[in-house]
Image: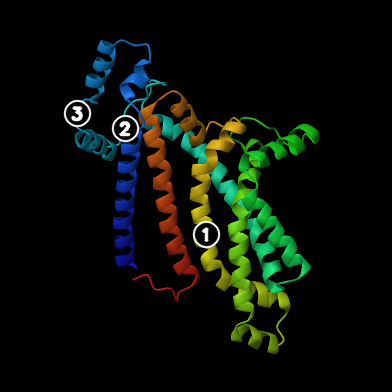
Amino acid sequence: MKSFLIRRALMAVMVLLTISFISFIMLKVSGDLAISLAGENAGADYVEFLRKTYGWDRPLYIQYADWLWNALHGNLGASFYYGKQVMELVAERMPVTMKLGALATGLSITAAIPLGMAAGIRPGSFVDRAVLLIALLGGATPIFWTSFLLILMLGLNLRWLPITGGADLQHLLMPALALSFYAMPAIIRIVRSGMIDVMASDYIRTAKAKGLRPLEIYFRHALRNTLVPVVAVASVQFGFLLGGSVVVENIFAINGIGYLTWEAINQNDYPVVQASVLTVSTAYVVLTLFADIVNRAIDPRIRLE
C-alpha cells in the first residue's frame, strides 16, 4: 500500500506539472496578453511597459519556471480584474463549487445505482429499456437545456426552488439536479453491466440454491462486487462536474470557481484563468487517487502494491 501511494503521488505530480505547462502555453499562444490587458486602442509604449512589468518579454521557459516556483510557494499572482490575490479568490469560490459537485455526485449515485441494479437484474425487460432510455437522454441532452427546463418547471411554474444565487442547499439543489442528470448515464451503465455479469456467476447461483432472499442476494452479494468500478467512475464524474460547472454556475448565478473562470476569461484575467485550471485539475487528480484507495477497501483482492 505504501509503495502504491508513493508511485501514485509521483504520477499525480507529473500529471499536474504537465497540465500546468500545457495551460500556460495555451494561454500564451492564444494572443498577446499585454495587448489584451491594455486594450486594442492602447499605445505601443504602454503595451511594452506592461510586457516589461509582468515579465512577458522574457523567454517562455523562464516565465513558466518563475510562475511554477511562485505557485509551489502558494503565490499564484494577483488578479488583473479584481485586484486581489488569486489564492484568496480561489479560496473564496472553490468551497461553493465543491459543495455543488458533491451534491450533484451524491444525487447521481443515489438515483443511478437503483436504476442500474433494476436494469441489470432483468436485462431486456421493460424496466431495462426504460432505464437505458433515461441514460440515453441524460447523455444526449445538453446541460444548459436541462438547466433551463428545471428553471421553467421547478422555479417558474411550480415555484418549489429558487433559480439564482446562494450557496445553501436550497439554492444549490436545482443546479445539482442539472449536473446529476448529466453524470447519471455513465454510472447507470456501469452498474447495469456489473449486475448482469455478477448475477450470472456461480456464487449467486449458489446463494439462490441456499434459499436466500432476493434482496439479500442483490444488495449483500451482488451489489458489493459491482461497486468497485462505480467508485472509480463516480470520482471521475465528480472531477468532470467541477470542470463543467462553468455553464451551470453562469446559468444559476452561483459564485463558484466556474463563474470565476468565466469572468476571468471575459476580462482577460490571465492569472485567475490559470489558477482555476490548476485548482480543478488538482482536485481531479486527488479524487482519482482517493477512488483507488476506496476500491482497495471495498475489494481486498485488488492489488495496489
Q: Secondary structure at mark 2?
A: helix
Q: Which residue is mark 3?
A: 58
User: Which mark is on residue 28?
Assistant: 2
Percent position (x, y) of residue 141? Answer: 65, 47
Give amino acid for label 1. Answer: Val
Q: Indicate whether 208 appears above or below 268.
A: below
Q: Please, what is the three-letter code of the amino acid marked with disc 3?
A: Arg
- Separation of residues labelled 3 and 2 (CA atoms): 12 Å
Q: Quadrant of residue 76?
A: top left
Q: Secondary structure at mark 3?
A: loop
Closer mark to the observer between disc 1 and disc 2:
2
Tag 3: Cα neighbours inside 10 Å, few (<14), some, or many (≥20)? few
Q: Is residue 210 visible?
A: no
- Distance, label 1 to label 3, CA atoms, is 42 Å
Q: Tell which of 43 and 66 is nearer to you.
A: 43
Residue on which the image places disc 1 = 233
Residue kind at label 2, given as amino acid type:
Lys
Residue drawn at x 59%, y 47% is 103
